[in-house]
Image: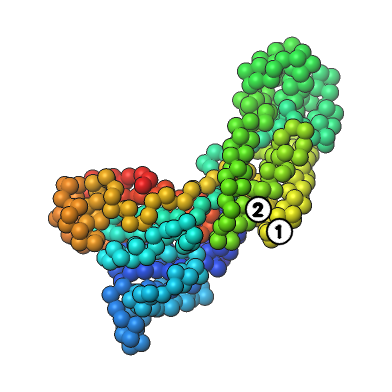
Amino acid sequence: MDRYDRQLRLWGKEGQSLLDNANICVVGDESPLLQEVWKNLVLSGVSKFTWMIENTMESSLQEKDLFSCDFITEISALHPSGIRVKRKALASLKGADNSFWFQFSLIIIINCSDSKLLELFNNSDSQYFPPIITTFATGLYGYLHTYLSEPHFIIESHPDNPIPELRLDQPWKELSIYLTKFQVDKMNEFEISELPYPVLLFHCVQMAARNNYKLTSPLLRNELRRWASDTNPTGLNDPNYIEAYRFAHLAFTNEKILIRLNEMIQYGFSMDHLDDPYNRKVIALLKALGEYINREDFPIYPIMGTIPDMSSSTKNYIELKQIYQNEGQKNTKSLQKLLDKEGEEVPFEMIKLFCANLKYLNVIKPTASKLTLLFSSDDDLLRDLLAIQYNLNDIANSGAINMKAASMNSYPTASFMGGVVGQEAIKLITHQYIPLDNIFTYDGLKNETKIFRI
């Protein structure tokens, strides 16, 4: 996918590998929405599909369907290696074993009008289905529903503003030796100006500890200001001092993260049996993490191994960066050794990603309700869309939909909803970014969107 290298900046080579190997089931007749969804998936790198066609018989698929063949040919041209599509009649699955669906990474139901299909996917305690996206668009309106029979773990949630971690209050041996070698009180103004700000913060942390002060961000800033005023008053406007004052809170280990990780670990231990291979790997990682955290006298989790850019001499910055990288690699290998006890084979690249993103691990819990409980929603727009989709007059007429706007032919709506569905499909396949949970509605007449959970 060299010609789409910007995609690799979004979800990396690991995400691209998951997309390249994905097997997606598309359920529905040919429609503008189906075309848009399919186009977005192929552009992202997905090449293996099964197309379950609703209003047809298996025998008719053996005949040449010019429109469908042309459509698939055009879509295939968007992928450098072409795509593989199996076509089946949805009616042919009547009475079939549910294990048929297990081969897929994702199921997308598009503009289907038979509510009995939803009953097929109703979850039970012992029944697993891949993630299911149900979507419908008509006129200026549309909705999307994501259904999960198992938890969906997100390792790379890609926060807008990732927060670094310096751990100056709990330094490991190599970091402590490096930071203490700088005799800051004996340096001149120029030498101090070339120090990375963690060196200044560590010096103040040590002073506060000697005075038995309880370490807090305000106290650390006060210590920093007092020390700078006494020893280097002309350096108060130096970039490294300004950074140290601004980022004093990064000196401390975030206890809230440890609490959140313990909650994730307990949730992992509560999952007795999971069918999804990716989920099993994450559970094994969480169990190994629990052992890692509790093996020391004080609980601590693997460090990310990265530091942000900062004002410093090149030499000092590279040395400090290398110390954090080495500790991150050491922590990752320690977790890998604990993971071997779990008996689940996890690629080392996944372990590295897990450790690098520990602070941002997330999980969306399984959908508690059955898929057919969509019809019991109290959202007027969703109820009206379902009534139109499945011809259910008994739940319509809330007034949320302008029928003239609903009956018009609006390809822009299909294009917009196709983009949303494609985006959510990529999130679910790559386990990156946080998916919508679990209803999304679009009102093009009012230019409004809404997200809520049922």
Query: Residue at image x 31%, y 46%?
Result: 449
Q: Which mark is residue 343?
A: 1
Query: Going by the image, does 21 lie left or right of 186?
Result: left
Q: Quadrant of residue 403?
A: bottom left
Residue 84: % across, % down: 47, 77
Query: Residue at image x 51%, y 49%?
Result: 433
Q: Which mark is residue 162?
A: none
From this view, report whether residue 99 is shown above or below residue 449: below
CB atoms of marks 1 and 2 within 8 Å = yes
Locate the N terminus and report the quarter of the image it occupies: bottom right
Residue 389: % across, % down: 24, 61
Query: Residue at image x 22%, y 56%?
Result: 387
Earlier residue among tags 1 and 2: 2
Residue 42: % across, % down: 45, 68
Task: Tell which of 351 and 166 is nearer to you.
Answer: 351
Q: Evaluate whether residue 299 shows in this view.
A: yes
Looking at the rendered structure, the secondary structure element under dot 1 is loop
Query: How many labels, in total?
Result: 2
Q: Which residue is mark 2?
A: 284
Q: Amino acid at mark 2?
A: Ala
Distance Cα–Cα, label 1 vs label 2: 8 Å
Q: Residue furthest bottom?
A: 63
Query: Residue at image x 75%, y 25%?
Result: 202
Looking at the rendered structure, the secondary structure element under dot 2 is helix
Q: Quadrant of residue 423?
A: bottom left
Q: Evaluate whether residue 423 shows in this view.
A: no
Q: Quadrant of residue 256?
A: top right
Neighbor class of circle 2 (other Cα within 10 Å; few <14, some 14-19, many 20+) is many
